[in-house]
Image: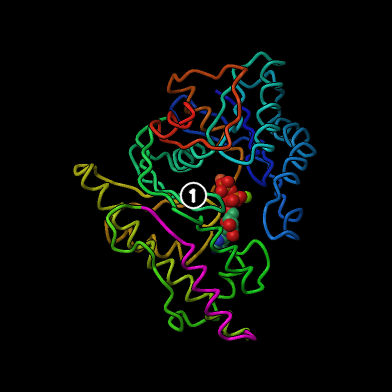
Amino acid sequence: LRILGIETSCDETAASVVLRHENGSGEIVSDVVLSQLEEHSAFGGVVPEIAARAHVEALDGLVRQALSQAGLTVHDVDAVAATSGPGLIGGLLVGLMTGKAIAMAANKPLYAINHLEGHALTARLTDGLEFPYLMLLVSGGHTQLVLVKGVGDYERWGTTIDDALGEAFDKTAKLLGLPYPGGPAVEKAARAGDASRFDFPRPLVGESRLDFSFSGLKTAVRQAATAIQPLSEQDIADICASFQRAISRTLKDRIGRGLARFQERYPTLQTPALVVAGGVAANQVLRATLQELCDHHRFRFIAPPIRLCTDNAAMIAWAGLERMAAGLPSDPISVAPRSRWPLDKEAAALIGSGK
Ligand code: ATP
Ligand code: MG
Ligand code: FE
Protein backbone atom coordinates (compact mmCIF):
# COMPACT_ATOMS: atom_id res chain seq x y z
CA LEU A 1 0.00 0.00 0.00
CA ARG A 2 1.19 3.47 -0.90
CA ILE A 3 -0.27 6.74 0.21
CA LEU A 4 0.24 10.46 -0.38
CA GLY A 5 0.27 12.53 2.82
CA ILE A 6 -0.33 16.27 3.21
CA GLU A 7 0.33 18.39 6.33
CA THR A 8 -0.58 22.09 6.72
CA SER A 9 -1.86 22.46 10.29
CA CYS A 10 0.68 25.01 11.54
CA ASP A 11 3.76 26.62 10.00
CA GLU A 12 5.17 23.72 7.98
CA THR A 13 3.88 22.88 4.52
CA ALA A 14 4.67 19.24 3.82
CA ALA A 15 3.98 16.36 1.43
CA SER A 16 5.20 12.79 1.51
CA VAL A 17 4.75 9.35 -0.03
CA VAL A 18 4.94 6.42 2.38
CA LEU A 19 4.82 2.73 1.61
CA ARG A 20 3.55 -0.02 3.89
CA HIS A 21 5.06 -3.44 3.25
CA GLU A 22 3.08 -6.66 3.57
CA ASN A 23 4.79 -7.43 6.87
CA GLY A 24 3.47 -4.16 8.31
CA SER A 25 6.71 -2.20 8.25
CA GLY A 26 6.78 1.26 6.74
CA GLU A 27 9.10 3.03 4.36
CA ILE A 28 9.28 6.73 3.64
CA VAL A 29 9.62 6.99 -0.13
CA SER A 30 9.70 10.78 -0.27
CA ASP A 31 9.29 13.49 2.34
CA VAL A 32 9.41 17.22 1.62
CA VAL A 33 8.90 19.96 4.19
CA LEU A 34 8.92 23.71 3.76
CA SER A 35 9.18 25.58 7.04
CA GLN A 36 7.73 29.08 7.17
CA LEU A 37 10.06 30.08 10.01
CA GLU A 38 11.38 33.12 8.18
CA GLU A 39 7.93 34.44 7.32
CA HIS A 40 6.96 34.42 10.99
CA SER A 41 10.19 35.21 12.82
CA ALA A 42 9.77 38.98 12.48
CA PHE A 43 6.51 38.65 14.43
CA GLY A 44 7.94 36.38 17.13
CA GLY A 45 5.29 33.73 16.51
CA VAL A 46 3.10 32.09 13.88
CA VAL A 47 0.70 34.54 12.18
CA PRO A 48 -2.33 32.47 11.00
CA GLU A 49 -3.16 34.58 7.94
CA ILE A 50 0.44 34.57 6.72
CA ALA A 51 0.65 30.82 7.34
CA ALA A 52 -2.49 30.09 5.30
CA ARG A 53 -1.28 32.16 2.35
CA ALA A 54 2.14 30.51 2.44
CA HIS A 55 0.51 27.05 2.39
CA VAL A 56 -1.53 28.04 -0.69
CA GLU A 57 1.62 29.17 -2.47
CA ALA A 58 3.78 26.18 -1.58
CA LEU A 59 1.55 23.12 -1.40
CA ASP A 60 1.03 22.34 -5.12
CA GLY A 61 4.75 22.38 -5.75
CA LEU A 62 5.52 20.24 -2.71
CA VAL A 63 2.95 17.59 -3.66
CA ARG A 64 4.40 17.48 -7.16
CA GLN A 65 7.91 17.18 -5.68
CA ALA A 66 6.94 14.39 -3.27
CA LEU A 67 5.33 12.40 -6.09
CA SER A 68 8.16 12.93 -8.59
CA GLN A 69 10.83 12.01 -6.02
CA ALA A 70 8.89 8.79 -5.50
CA GLY A 71 8.66 8.31 -9.27
CA LEU A 72 4.87 8.22 -9.06
CA THR A 73 1.77 10.07 -10.22
CA VAL A 74 -1.43 10.51 -8.22
CA HIS A 75 -2.80 7.47 -10.05
CA ASP A 76 -0.16 5.21 -8.54
CA VAL A 77 -1.01 5.79 -4.87
CA ASP A 78 -3.73 3.82 -3.08
CA ALA A 79 -5.10 6.74 -1.08
CA VAL A 80 -4.63 10.35 -0.01
CA ALA A 81 -4.22 11.40 3.64
CA ALA A 82 -4.49 15.02 4.74
CA THR A 83 -4.35 16.60 8.18
CA SER A 84 -7.80 17.89 9.05
CA GLY A 85 -7.15 19.08 12.60
CA PRO A 86 -6.33 20.25 15.17
CA GLY A 87 -4.53 23.42 14.09
CA LEU A 88 -4.94 26.78 12.40
CA ILE A 89 -8.14 26.64 10.38
CA GLY A 90 -6.79 28.51 7.34
CA GLY A 91 -3.92 26.09 6.87
CA LEU A 92 -6.12 23.05 7.52
CA LEU A 93 -8.54 24.24 4.83
CA VAL A 94 -5.74 24.54 2.28
CA GLY A 95 -4.36 21.05 2.97
CA LEU A 96 -7.66 19.24 3.30
CA MET A 97 -9.19 20.84 0.19
CA THR A 98 -6.06 19.98 -1.80
CA GLY A 99 -6.27 16.41 -0.54
CA LYS A 100 -9.94 16.22 -1.49
CA ALA A 101 -9.28 17.59 -4.96
CA ILE A 102 -6.53 15.05 -5.62
CA ALA A 103 -8.57 12.17 -4.17
CA MET A 104 -11.59 13.08 -6.31
CA ALA A 105 -9.61 13.65 -9.49
CA ALA A 106 -7.70 10.38 -9.15
CA ASN A 107 -10.66 8.47 -7.69
CA LYS A 108 -8.83 7.44 -4.49
CA PRO A 109 -10.10 7.16 -0.92
CA LEU A 110 -9.44 10.15 1.35
CA TYR A 111 -8.29 9.88 4.94
CA ALA A 112 -8.80 12.98 7.10
CA ILE A 113 -6.08 12.61 9.70
CA ASN A 114 -5.80 13.95 13.23
CA HIS A 115 -2.40 15.64 13.44
CA LEU A 116 -1.89 14.27 16.97
CA GLU A 117 -2.49 10.74 15.70
CA GLY A 118 0.32 11.35 13.21
CA HIS A 119 2.69 12.19 16.06
CA ALA A 120 1.35 9.29 18.14
CA LEU A 121 1.98 6.60 15.50
CA THR A 122 5.37 7.81 14.17
CA ALA A 123 7.34 5.44 16.41
CA ARG A 124 5.65 2.49 14.70
CA LEU A 125 6.99 3.75 11.37
CA THR A 126 10.51 4.43 12.65
CA ASP A 127 10.90 1.65 15.24
CA GLY A 128 8.11 -0.82 14.53
CA LEU A 129 6.88 -0.27 18.07
CA GLU A 130 4.03 -2.51 19.29
CA PHE A 131 0.96 -1.26 21.20
CA PRO A 132 0.49 -0.21 23.95
CA TYR A 133 3.00 2.54 24.75
CA LEU A 134 3.15 6.01 26.21
CA MET A 135 3.76 9.10 24.13
CA LEU A 136 4.87 12.52 25.30
CA LEU A 137 4.11 15.21 22.74
CA VAL A 138 5.91 18.47 23.41
CA SER A 139 5.62 21.13 20.71
CA GLY A 140 4.74 24.80 20.26
CA GLY A 141 1.03 24.05 20.45
CA HIS A 142 0.76 20.85 22.51
CA THR A 143 1.97 19.27 25.72
CA GLN A 144 0.30 15.90 26.18
CA LEU A 145 0.97 12.55 27.73
CA VAL A 146 -1.03 9.99 25.77
CA LEU A 147 -1.58 6.27 26.21
CA VAL A 148 -1.48 4.77 22.71
CA LYS A 149 -3.49 1.52 22.83
CA GLY A 150 -4.11 0.94 19.14
CA VAL A 151 -4.89 2.71 15.87
CA GLY A 152 -7.65 5.19 16.70
CA ASP A 153 -7.54 4.12 20.35
CA TYR A 154 -5.97 6.72 22.65
CA GLU A 155 -6.29 7.95 26.22
CA ARG A 156 -5.03 11.38 27.10
CA TRP A 157 -3.51 11.15 30.57
CA GLY A 158 -2.19 14.67 30.91
CA THR A 159 -2.18 18.00 29.15
CA THR A 160 -1.12 21.53 29.90
CA ILE A 161 -3.56 23.72 31.75
CA ASP A 162 -1.96 26.88 30.31
CA ASP A 163 1.11 27.24 28.03
CA ALA A 164 2.55 24.45 25.89
CA LEU A 165 6.17 23.60 26.65
CA GLY A 166 7.46 24.96 23.32
CA GLU A 167 5.43 28.10 23.94
CA ALA A 168 7.14 28.49 27.35
CA PHE A 169 10.53 28.28 25.61
CA ASP A 170 9.42 30.81 22.98
CA LYS A 171 8.01 33.28 25.52
CA THR A 172 11.04 32.98 27.79
CA ALA A 173 13.33 33.66 24.85
CA LYS A 174 11.31 36.73 23.91
CA LEU A 175 11.52 38.07 27.47
CA LEU A 176 15.29 37.69 27.39
CA GLY A 177 15.68 39.28 23.95
CA LEU A 178 16.67 35.99 22.32
CA PRO A 179 15.57 35.20 18.73
CA TYR A 180 12.53 33.18 17.59
CA PRO A 181 12.06 30.23 17.72
CA GLY A 182 12.99 30.36 21.36
CA GLY A 183 13.75 26.70 22.05
CA PRO A 184 17.08 26.40 20.24
CA ALA A 185 18.15 29.88 21.45
CA VAL A 186 17.40 29.09 25.10
CA GLU A 187 19.13 25.73 24.89
CA LYS A 188 22.23 27.31 23.35
CA ALA A 189 22.42 30.12 25.91
CA ALA A 190 21.88 27.67 28.77
CA ARG A 191 25.08 25.78 27.95
CA ALA A 192 27.18 28.57 29.45
CA GLY A 193 24.85 29.06 32.40
CA ASP A 194 24.66 28.13 36.08
CA ALA A 195 21.46 26.10 36.53
CA SER A 196 21.51 26.49 40.31
CA ARG A 197 21.46 30.31 40.33
CA PHE A 198 17.66 30.68 40.19
CA ASP A 199 15.19 28.42 41.92
CA PHE A 200 12.25 28.64 39.51
CA PRO A 201 8.84 27.14 40.41
CA ARG A 202 7.84 23.62 39.47
CA PRO A 203 4.05 23.77 39.22
CA LEU A 204 1.88 20.71 39.95
CA VAL A 205 4.88 18.69 41.14
CA GLY A 206 3.63 16.19 43.70
CA GLU A 207 0.05 16.15 42.41
CA SER A 208 -1.37 12.81 41.37
CA ARG A 209 -3.14 14.01 38.21
CA LEU A 210 -0.77 14.08 35.28
CA ASP A 211 -1.33 17.60 33.92
CA PHE A 212 1.31 20.25 33.23
CA SER A 213 1.49 23.99 33.81
CA PHE A 214 4.20 26.31 32.51
CA SER A 215 2.85 29.86 32.72
CA GLY A 216 4.05 30.39 36.31
CA LEU A 217 7.54 29.52 35.21
CA LYS A 218 7.42 32.21 32.54
CA THR A 219 6.24 34.76 35.14
CA ALA A 220 9.11 33.81 37.44
CA VAL A 221 11.55 34.28 34.59
CA ARG A 222 10.10 37.72 33.92
CA GLN A 223 10.48 38.70 37.57
CA ALA A 224 14.07 37.46 37.71
CA ALA A 225 14.91 39.27 34.47
CA THR A 226 13.38 42.61 35.48
CA ALA A 227 15.12 42.48 38.87
CA ILE A 228 18.57 42.56 37.30
CA GLN A 229 18.32 45.03 34.40
CA PRO A 230 20.46 45.43 32.39
CA LEU A 231 20.96 41.72 31.83
CA SER A 232 24.48 40.58 31.08
CA GLU A 233 25.12 37.65 28.78
CA GLN A 234 25.96 35.58 31.87
CA ASP A 235 22.65 36.53 33.54
CA ILE A 236 20.77 35.36 30.45
CA ALA A 237 22.72 32.12 30.37
CA ASP A 238 22.02 31.50 34.07
CA ILE A 239 18.30 32.19 33.65
CA CYS A 240 18.10 29.83 30.65
CA ALA A 241 19.98 27.07 32.47
CA SER A 242 17.80 27.48 35.58
CA PHE A 243 14.66 27.52 33.41
CA GLN A 244 15.65 24.24 31.76
CA ARG A 245 16.45 22.69 35.11
CA ALA A 246 13.00 23.62 36.44
CA ILE A 247 11.43 22.01 33.39
CA SER A 248 13.57 18.95 33.74
CA ARG A 249 12.53 18.52 37.38
CA THR A 250 8.88 19.09 36.55
CA LEU A 251 8.95 16.49 33.79
CA LYS A 252 10.71 14.01 36.03
CA ASP A 253 7.84 14.20 38.48
CA ARG A 254 4.99 14.33 35.97
CA ILE A 255 6.29 11.72 33.52
CA GLY A 256 7.64 9.55 36.33
CA ARG A 257 4.10 9.26 37.64
CA GLY A 258 2.90 8.47 34.14
CA LEU A 259 5.39 5.61 33.77
CA ALA A 260 4.34 4.22 37.15
CA ARG A 261 0.69 4.37 36.16
CA PHE A 262 1.48 2.58 32.90
CA GLN A 263 3.24 -0.18 34.84
CA GLU A 264 0.23 -0.59 37.11
CA ARG A 265 -2.02 -0.84 34.08
CA TYR A 266 0.17 -3.32 32.18
CA PRO A 267 2.09 -5.19 34.89
CA THR A 268 3.07 -8.10 32.64
CA LEU A 269 4.23 -6.15 29.58
CA GLN A 270 7.81 -7.17 28.80
CA THR A 271 9.23 -3.97 27.32
CA PRO A 272 7.18 -0.89 28.12
CA ALA A 273 8.16 2.17 26.07
CA LEU A 274 7.97 5.95 26.18
CA VAL A 275 8.08 7.83 22.89
CA VAL A 276 8.78 11.55 22.63
CA ALA A 277 7.49 13.74 19.77
CA GLY A 278 7.21 17.43 18.90
CA GLY A 279 9.77 20.14 18.25
CA VAL A 280 10.88 20.39 21.89
CA ALA A 281 12.13 16.80 21.57
CA ALA A 282 15.20 18.37 19.95
CA ASN A 283 16.25 19.63 23.39
CA GLN A 284 19.21 17.67 24.78
CA VAL A 285 18.43 18.41 28.43
CA LEU A 286 14.89 17.12 27.93
CA ARG A 287 16.17 14.02 26.17
CA ALA A 288 18.70 13.28 28.90
CA THR A 289 15.99 13.72 31.54
CA LEU A 290 13.62 11.33 29.79
CA GLN A 291 16.37 8.81 29.13
CA GLU A 292 17.34 8.82 32.80
CA LEU A 293 13.73 8.45 33.86
CA CYS A 294 13.19 5.55 31.46
CA ASP A 295 16.36 3.82 32.64
CA HIS A 296 15.14 4.16 36.20
CA HIS A 297 11.70 2.69 35.43
CA ARG A 298 13.09 0.11 32.95
CA PHE A 299 11.27 1.64 30.01
CA ARG A 300 12.57 1.78 26.47
CA PHE A 301 13.03 5.43 25.50
CA ILE A 302 12.31 6.14 21.86
CA ALA A 303 13.10 9.47 20.23
CA PRO A 304 12.48 9.38 16.47
CA PRO A 305 14.81 11.51 14.30
CA ILE A 306 14.10 15.23 14.84
CA ARG A 307 12.83 15.59 11.29
CA LEU A 308 10.02 13.18 12.17
CA CYS A 309 9.43 14.71 15.62
CA THR A 310 8.58 18.12 14.18
CA ASP A 311 5.67 18.61 11.81
CA ASN A 312 5.95 16.55 8.63
CA ALA A 313 3.71 14.76 6.13
CA ALA A 314 5.30 11.31 6.45
CA MET A 315 3.58 10.87 9.81
CA ILE A 316 0.24 11.88 8.28
CA ALA A 317 0.71 9.44 5.41
CA TRP A 318 1.68 6.72 7.88
CA ALA A 319 -1.39 7.38 10.04
CA GLY A 320 -3.48 6.97 6.89
CA LEU A 321 -1.76 3.66 6.11
CA GLU A 322 -2.31 2.44 9.66
CA ARG A 323 -5.99 3.30 9.36
CA MET A 324 -6.25 1.47 6.03
CA ALA A 325 -4.43 -1.59 7.36
CA ALA A 326 -6.63 -1.63 10.47
CA GLY A 327 -9.71 -1.66 8.25
CA LEU A 328 -10.96 1.72 9.43
CA PRO A 329 -13.17 3.52 6.91
CA SER A 330 -11.96 6.36 4.72
CA ASP A 331 -13.66 9.73 5.09
CA PRO A 332 -16.47 11.22 3.01
CA ILE A 333 -15.50 14.02 0.66
CA SER A 334 -17.71 16.32 2.75
CA VAL A 335 -15.44 15.98 5.82
CA ALA A 336 -14.69 19.36 7.41
CA PRO A 337 -11.48 20.57 9.07
CA ARG A 338 -11.57 20.99 12.85
CA SER A 339 -9.38 23.53 14.61
CA ARG A 340 -10.01 21.64 17.86
CA TRP A 341 -9.93 17.86 17.77
CA PRO A 342 -8.77 15.94 20.85
CA LEU A 343 -7.38 12.46 20.24
CA ASP A 344 -9.40 10.52 22.78
CA LYS A 345 -12.85 9.50 21.62
CA GLU A 346 -14.78 10.74 24.65
CA ALA A 347 -13.38 14.26 24.42
CA ALA A 348 -13.69 14.31 20.62
CA ALA A 349 -17.33 13.26 20.81
CA LEU A 350 -18.11 16.08 23.23
CA ILE A 351 -16.63 18.70 20.92
CA GLY A 352 -18.25 17.11 17.85
CA SER A 353 -21.67 17.38 19.49
CA GLY A 354 -21.09 21.03 20.26
CA LYS A 355 -20.96 20.54 24.02
P1 ATP B 1 2.22 21.84 16.65
O1 ATP B 1 2.23 22.19 18.09
O2 ATP B 1 0.96 22.23 15.97
O3 ATP B 1 2.57 20.42 16.39
P2 ATP B 1 4.49 23.65 16.23
O4 ATP B 1 4.97 24.19 14.94
O5 ATP B 1 4.11 24.61 17.27
O6 ATP B 1 3.33 22.65 15.87
P3 ATP B 1 6.87 22.04 16.27
O7 ATP B 1 7.19 22.54 14.92
O8 ATP B 1 6.78 20.57 16.50
O9 ATP B 1 5.58 22.69 16.86
O10 ATP B 1 7.95 22.60 17.29
C1 ATP B 1 8.24 23.96 17.45
C2 ATP B 1 8.51 24.25 18.91
O11 ATP B 1 9.65 23.49 19.35
C3 ATP B 1 8.82 25.71 19.19
O12 ATP B 1 8.09 26.13 20.31
C4 ATP B 1 10.32 25.70 19.47
O13 ATP B 1 10.75 26.73 20.33
C5 ATP B 1 10.50 24.34 20.10
N1 ATP B 1 11.89 23.86 20.00
C6 ATP B 1 12.60 23.62 18.88
N2 ATP B 1 13.88 23.26 19.18
C7 ATP B 1 13.97 23.28 20.54
C8 ATP B 1 15.02 23.02 21.48
N3 ATP B 1 16.26 22.69 21.08
N4 ATP B 1 14.72 23.13 22.80
C9 ATP B 1 13.49 23.46 23.21
N5 ATP B 1 12.47 23.75 22.39
C10 ATP B 1 12.70 23.65 21.07
MG1 MG C 1 6.22 24.01 13.48
FE1 FE D 1 2.88 18.89 15.44
| Residue named by callout 1 | 277
Position in image of residue 19 (x %, y %): 56, 29
Span highlighted in magenta in the image: 211-231
* Residue 343 picture quarter: top left
Magenta stretch contains residue 220: yes
Position in image of residue 335 (x %, y %): 59, 22
Residue pictured at 73% horizontal, 40% vertical: 52
The N terminus lies in quadrant: top right
Residue pictured at 67% horizontal, 56% vertical: 45
- Observer-nearest of 255 and 219: 219
Residue pictured at 57% horizontal, 27% vertical: 112
Left or right of 208, for residue 309: right
The C terminus lies in quadrant: top left
Res 307 seen here? no
Magenta stretch contains residue 351: no
Left or right of 228, for residue 102: right
* Disc 1 C-beta below 8 A from ligand 3: yes
- Observer-nearest of 164 and 61: 164
Within 10 Å of the Cα at label 1, are there few (<14), some (14-19), or many (20+) other Cα atoms? many
